[in-house]
Image (cartoon, rainbow, N blue to C red):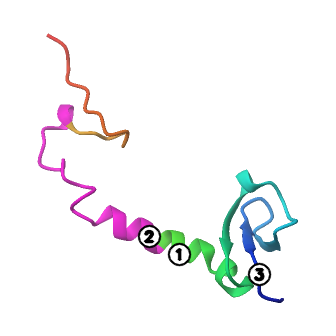
Amino acid sequence: MTEGQWYYCLTHHAVEPYEGCKSENRLGPYPTAADAANALEKVRERNEEWDTDPRFNDDLDAPPNQRDDDADGFVIFPGP
């Protein structure tokens, strides 16, 4: 495959050029087909980095009812 914009299709589990499936069903763009083929591994690596990054886990010491478990940035405190 040649250089350009490449995507990893989550529906077909395949590397596709720009003219492939809808954007909502793919990851990318990547500069090479090889990078697109490695998309899921890159996602795993990033998830692991974020899961272990203290900037994103700063509420682990908070009581369970005060944790921001839905990752929207808001903590919902229980009512009276």
Report which residue position mark 2 lands on.
46
- Picture coordinates of residue 59, whole percent (x, y): 18, 47
- Picture coordinates of residue 1, whole percent (x, y): 84, 89
- Picture coordinates of residue 5, whole percent (x, y): 75, 75
Helix, strand or loop at label 3? It is: loop
Query: Which one is nearer the viewer's eye here, 78 or 73?
Result: 73
Number of marks present in the image shown: 3
Extreme residue in the right direction: 19
Helix, strand or loop at label 1? It is: helix
Question: What residue is at 14 percent from the left and 10 percent from the top?
Answer: 80
- Residue 58 belongs to magenta span: yes
Q: Do the residues labelled 1 and 2 touch (CB within 8 Å)?
A: yes
Question: What residue is at 66 percent from the left and 68 percent from the top?
Answer: 28
Residue 4 numbered tag = 3
Report which residue position mark 1 lands on.
42
- Picture layout, residue 47 above or below residue 59: below
Q: Are marks 3 and 2 in contact (CB under 8 Å)?
A: no
Helix, strand or loop at label 2? It is: helix
For label 3, count other residues whose C-alpha is less than 10 Å away and answer few (under 14), some (14-19) or many (20+): few
